[in-house]
Amino acid sequence: MLLGMATASLALAQGAFVVDHDWVATGGLAIGQQGVIHIATGAAIAAYDADGVQLWHRPGEGVQNVAVDRQGNTYGVGAGILVKLDAGGTVQWAVAPEGQVRSVATDAEGHIYLAGYRDGLSGGQARPEDMIIAKYDTDGQRLWQFSITNVLGRCRYPCHRTQEPSIAVDANGMLHVVGYFTGTIDVDPGVSVKALDAGASMDVFVARYDADGQYLNAFRVGGDPQGQNKAMISP
């Protein structure tokens, strides 16, 4: 089911971008063409060559993860932000996706895929609940979006931990999503239900979708991932 976009406080001025947020970003890394290293520090996005020479640097508070497409464009994500910079580090556009965006990936055609979550209330506090997966075109227009939800409507524990979920795109354009969950979740965004159950504790799942967001398959990794920091890497 397609969902509406939330609003965020975004500003573009002199190549800088700012987003209001209430969490501390930890940084992200992507390797582009010719081995160019792109990093997000939570306070900026920067690019370096293989010898560590800085190629460009742009303030970008709240941006915690990055991806690079085949044209050398950089995409940064964070709490309610998706920003595109060209190969020289000039900001092209910024949009406000729904929820807390934790991971970003691109395909061979330059489409952008996001993975994040929306907060719910548990015990009077905001807790990560439904996971959100979305696809955008190269101009920042959202093409589709769906949620991975808890079948019972509530989580017995925060559904998705900090640093998750994560998303990657393989050479065939298939999406791979990994995340933490508790209880029973439905990983099929269509009319069918594909339920995965974590049992009495926290577990990790991996789900695959095609480029249109159609469910392919999913499985549990098994075990309690608490305290671990996992990420997906595109081939």
Image (cartoon, grey):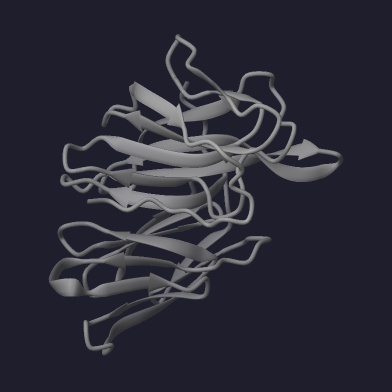
When the figure is inspected, residue 77 is found, relative to residue 41, above or below; the finding is above
Whether residue 11 can be seen here: yes
User: Where on the picture, by quarter, is residue 143?
Assistant: top left
Q: Residue at x 51, y 41 (%)?
A: 179
When the figure is inspected, residue 43 is found, relative to residue 166, above or below; the finding is below
Query: On the rendered structure, is 119 left or right of 6?
Result: right
User: Where on the picture, by quarter, is residue 133?
Assistant: top left
Please count the marks in the image.
0
Query: On the rendered structure, is 233 left or right of 21?
Result: left
Q: Position of residue 15 (x, y in %)?
A: 38, 74
- Residue found farthest to the top: 192
When the figure is inspected, residue 85 is found, relative to residue 159, above or below; the finding is below
Q: Position of residue 82 (x, y in %)?
A: 42, 54
Camera-nearest residue between 45 and 207 = 207
Camera-nearest residue between 215 and 195 = 195
Query: On the rendered structure, is 54 left or right of 21?
Result: left
User: Where on the picture, by quarter, is residue 56?
Assistant: bottom left
Q: Residue at x 22, y 51 (%)?
A: 235
Q: Residue at x 45, y 43 (%)?
A: 115
Whether residue 89 can be seen here: no
Camera-nearest residue between 58 and 50 = 50
Q: Position of residue 150 (x, y in %)?
A: 62, 25
When the figure is inspected, residue 106 is found, relative to residue 61, above or below; the finding is above
Q: Position of residue 80 (x, y in %)?
A: 54, 51
